[in-house]
Image (tube, rainbow, N blue to C red):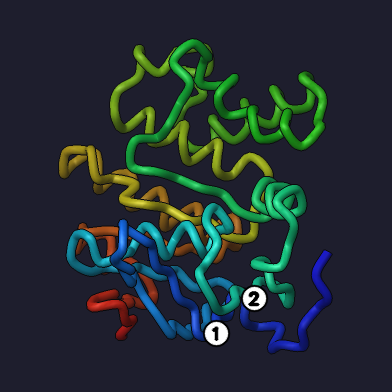
Amino acid sequence: MAAELVKDKNILIHTNLLAKSYQLGKNKVNIFENLSLEIKRGEMIAIVGPSGAGKSTLLHVLGGLDRPTSGSVIMDGFDICKLSDVDLARMRNKDIGFVFQFHHLLPEFSAVENTMMPLLISGKSQKTSRESAKNILTRVGLGQRLEHRPGELSGGEAARVALARALICEPKLLLADEPTGNLDSHTGEEIHKLLKLIHSECSLTSIIVTHNERLAAICSKVLHLEDGQLRT
């Protein structure tokens, strides 16, 4: 485990000179560079910007799904970029909940089975994991759909399962990438309200990548990523 860095305890995430680039043949493509930001505990942050600006890449780097080319991501006083792959996977499972646009639910498993997966991965028993999954699914309004598979759920219901799965390990950080991008406006509004409610009830810090102005508007802060730079 990386050594703890002295930092303001009110700050959950701090980045310093964060950069990400890719090599395409002989060309180096800079996605973003020299990004420094602080995210306080309890904040609900929207990251907006044009398509291709690197919003999802930034979210993946902040959540340890991808490693930066250079710079650091300090979360809770630790530089997660210095963790081994094994320690990074454990940290993601324990501390971070992810919600993606396409949900990534396993079609052969029920809502409750999809939701309990992270707990099983962490080593919890089948009984404990299933009970926790039932509770969190009920909390997001799916108490009557526990045994339905993804193909039997509406888009809004699938989004709720994805959110329940993200919350099952009681993370401190929720990262959402276009969580309502595939939903109609009415269903999207319902999920927006649920995200806001869950953010408050679970004392989360949330970072949401979105093109949806209504979703961005309910967040406490909006950051614009464009031309490789973040602006408020």
For image coordinates 30% across by 85% down, the residue present is 231
Mark 1 residue type? Asn
Residue picked out by circle 2? 74
Left/right placement of residue 12 relative to residue 214 reads right
Q: Nearer the viewer, residue 77 or 84?
A: 84
Residue 178 position within the rendered picture, expressed as x and y whole percent measured from the top left: 31, 50
Query: Which residue is rendered at x = 78% and y = 26% of the image?
Result: 128
Quadrant for the N terminus in the image: bottom right
Q: Is 67 placed left or right of 22 in the picture?
A: right
Q: Amino acid at mark 2?
A: Ile
Give residue 53's position: percent from left, percent from top.
25, 66
| Residue 16: mark | 1
Nearer to the camera, 68 or 15: 68
Q: Please, which residue is most extreme toward the front here?
A: 26
Q: CA distance from mark 1 to mark 2?
A: 8 Å
Label drawn at residue 93: none
The crowding category of the residue bearing disc 1, from other C-alpha atoms within 10 Å (few below 14, some 14 to 19, many at least 20), is some
Height in image: 88 above or below 42? above
Residue 230 spot, x, y in % from top left: 33, 81
Q: Are marks 1 and 2 in contact (CB under 8 Å)?
A: yes
Quarter of the figure with residue 41: bottom right
Answer with mark 1 or mark 2, whichever residue precedes in sequence: 1
Secondary structure state at the residue bearing disc 2: strand
- The residue sitting at 52% across, 67% down in the picture is 68
In the figure, 155 relative to 200: above or below? Answer: above
